[in-house]
Image (spheres, rainbow, N blue to C red):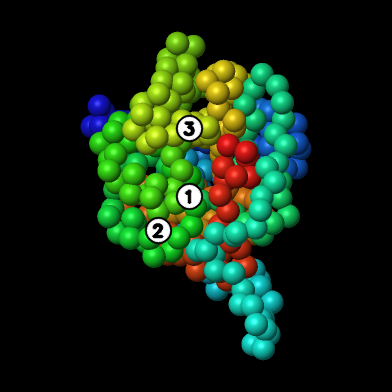
Amino acid sequence: MHRTVAARLLLACALAAAVPAVLLASGDGAGLGIVAAPPTEPSHLPPDDAGGEPLHPDDVLTSMVPVSATDPGSAPAPVDPSATTPPPDAATPSTTAVTPVSLPVGPEAPVVSRVPTTDRVVFVTIDDGLERDPAVVEFFREHPMPSSLFLVQSAAAAGEDFFRQLQDAGATIHTHTYTHPDLTTVDTATRTNEVCGPLDDFEARFGRRPTLFRPPYGAVDDTVQVTAKGCGYRAVVLWKAATNAGQLQVQEEELQPGDVILLHFRPDLLQNLEMLVDALDAQGFTVGRLEDYLGA
């Protein structure tokens, strides 16, 4: 199963132009990054500015703008050296009490890419799980911060100990289907199995039932949302920014409070995490726990 999923993921990357991601539009909670159903997806992948290779299909966003950790246009105001309280470190989670946001109520699990909050926080999410670098565990131990992992079932099974270590370092584990298909193209029985099927297995493995779901390639429509709601998920999570080859790329001109950031368990994950911490520090963001803000 693991080889099959890996092959499918590699094929998805090679055929990324044919399987683009879905973007967000207005709906319940318009302007807040929470929608009932997204519009038609784009038809191509943007180039990777770092090396000319296309982004992973899950990384596709509109008007993606590379953000430098030292970008003067996004750096916070100078700090008074006489101040007794230093600025927050992005790698240190906020201890401020969080009031969960109100999500749209209805038969569909809402799609979330930005949490409506004025807190200067963003959310770290990491997909798939096929590459498992022990240095990533050490990174999270040295830089304690919450993260939400959206794992393919076979990868979760193969790397159970690795992901438990990340749990101990502050991660929360959620689902990303069994075999990583485009859920908008499969029949009802397959979609239900892919979305709902991993829940019992993940609960048994990791001691907690997942409450958030991420569809492969960001491909979501009302049938996916209805299925997710029926399985008990609180929200379908997409993203407003993504990392690739040591660069942070955002959908808008700059990160906004509440933005969800997408990373992948790939060979460049450690590089992307190191870059991200520096970028967030430079822009005055901390990392929040997505589950707290979504009441999940």
Instruction: Name which quarter of the figure residue 84 lies in.
Output: bottom right
Question: Does the image show residue 24?
Answer: yes
Position of residue 132 measured from the top left corner of the image (x, y, whole percent): 29, 48
Looking at the picture, which amino acid does disc 3 mark? Pro
Looking at the picture, which amino acid does disc 2 mark? Phe
Position of residue 218 measured from the top left corner of the image (x, y, whole percent): 52, 35
Callouts 3 and 2 close, C-beta under 8 Å: no
Compared with 29, 166 (above or below) is: below
Quadrant of the rendering where the C terminus is positioned: top right
Question: Does the image show residue 25?
Answer: no
Give the mark nearest the N terminus, 3 or 2: 2
The residue under the point 70% across, 34% down is 103
Q: Residues within 10 Å of mark 2 (few under 14, many from 20)?
A: many
Position of residue 274 measured from the top left corner of the image (x, y, whole percent): 42, 64
Q: Residues within 10 Å of mark 1 (few under 14, many from 20)?
A: many
Q: Nearer the viewer, residue 50 or 163?
A: 163
Q: How far is mark 1 from mark 2, CA to CA?
A: 9 Å
Q: In this view, does 274 lie to the left or right of 117?
A: left
Residue that numbered label 2 is attached to: 140
Callouts 1 and 2 close, C-beta under 8 Å: yes
Give the mark nearest the N terminus, 1 or 2: 2
Looking at the picture, which amino acid does disc 1 mark? Ser
Residue that numbered label 3 is attached to: 210
Q: Which residue lies furthest to the bottom in this view?
A: 82
Q: Nearer the viewer, residue 86 or 52?
A: 86
In the picture, the disc for residue 147 is 1
